[in-house]
Image: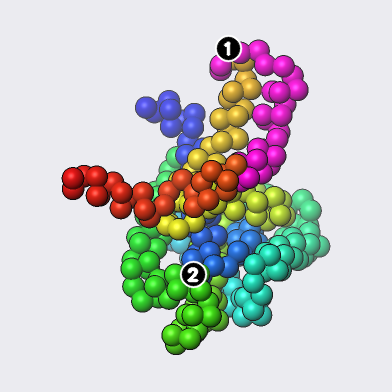
Amino acid sequence: MAGFFATYGNLIVLMVLGAMLGLSLYLPLMTGQLSLASPGFYALGGYIAAILSTKVFITNSSLFPIPLLLLEMLIAGAVCGLLGILVGIPALRLRGIYLAIATIAFVEVLRVISLNLDITGGAVGIFGIPQPFQTAIEYLWIAVPLLIISMFFLYRLERIRVGRAFAAIREDELAADAMGINPTYYKVLAFTLGAILAGIVGAISAHFLNTWNARQGTFDASIIYLTFVLIGGSKTFLGPVLGGMVFTALPEMLRAIADPEITGLQLPTAIAQFLQDGRLIIFGLLIVIGTIFFPQGLVTPDLFKRRRVRNNK
């Protein structure tokens, strides 16, 4: 077991972080808003943690103090939440593909800004971000409780008045408005909650990866996070969690298939290279296939209802 965690510790932590990034995209989708801004807030949260830990919270300890990491997560979440409100109020007046384009533009603006600032390290980025743990698997002491808290929060959110308002807006915004629900308020709230979660995950990831640069928040990342939600399921919070874990592990699985030392198969060079480097193409194909055969994703609310009915019989 120790050997398993030593070998796959990095991947396990990335799977948990991927699940939370899927939830950050799922939150705006709860109100029917196709927002692809999560990579921007994720990158911003990482930059905040990287700058604070290398330029402000300088310690002589061999390990970065956990309380300072928690403070960085709090600051990153607060800054991303404030920016989410400022961006969300004008952007969420748009709908559908226009909102998606606007949020992609927001991600690109943040990326270009980070490439041209000295404090962010420009195109090179920030290196030598101090580590709070000695091994990768120890990051689960932070990541897993945060994932559990996020899942419990969304579980409760879907069952209270705010969650019902989100669902009403997603199903029919005009009808929800006619019933006295303020669509702008709830859409901005969902957008802001997603921004806060993405920023917090970025703060953890910056320390975990030990380096941070503009490649962390790109259009490619938007497509990957969208895959988490669409294939996992966009009608319940369990869908993005499953999608985030599976599709974070997928590139490593493809590399393992292409490695003859692991599988014993000698694949043609072109196929092996495609499996290793064609991640975005494969994700795009999965989105197309998934939306055709599983329009609501692999995990749907009806799935659990059918199981309960079958068990009662």
Image quarter for residue 276? top right
- Residue in the foreground of this view, choosing between 105 and 301: 301
Above or below, 4 against 31 in this view is above
How many numbered tags mark residues here? Answer: 2
Q: Which residue appears farthest toward the left when viewing the image?
A: 313
Circle nearer the viewer, 2 or 1:
2
Quadrant assignment for the C terminus: top left
User: Residue at 63% across / 45% down in the picture?
Assistant: 288
Q: Residues within 10 Å of mark 1 (few under 14, many from 20)?
A: few
Residue 282 x %, y %:
65, 37
Residue 178 x %, y %:
48, 86
Q: The disc labelled 1 sits on which kind of residue?
A: Gly
Above or below, 241 against 27 in this view is above
User: Residue at 43% across / 76% down in the picture?
Assistant: 165
Query: Disc 2 marks which residue?
Result: 171
Q: The disc labelled 2 sits on which kind of residue?
A: Glu
Query: Disc 1 marks which residue?
Result: 264
Residue 173 on the magenta segment: no
Q: Which residues are magenta?
A: 262-288
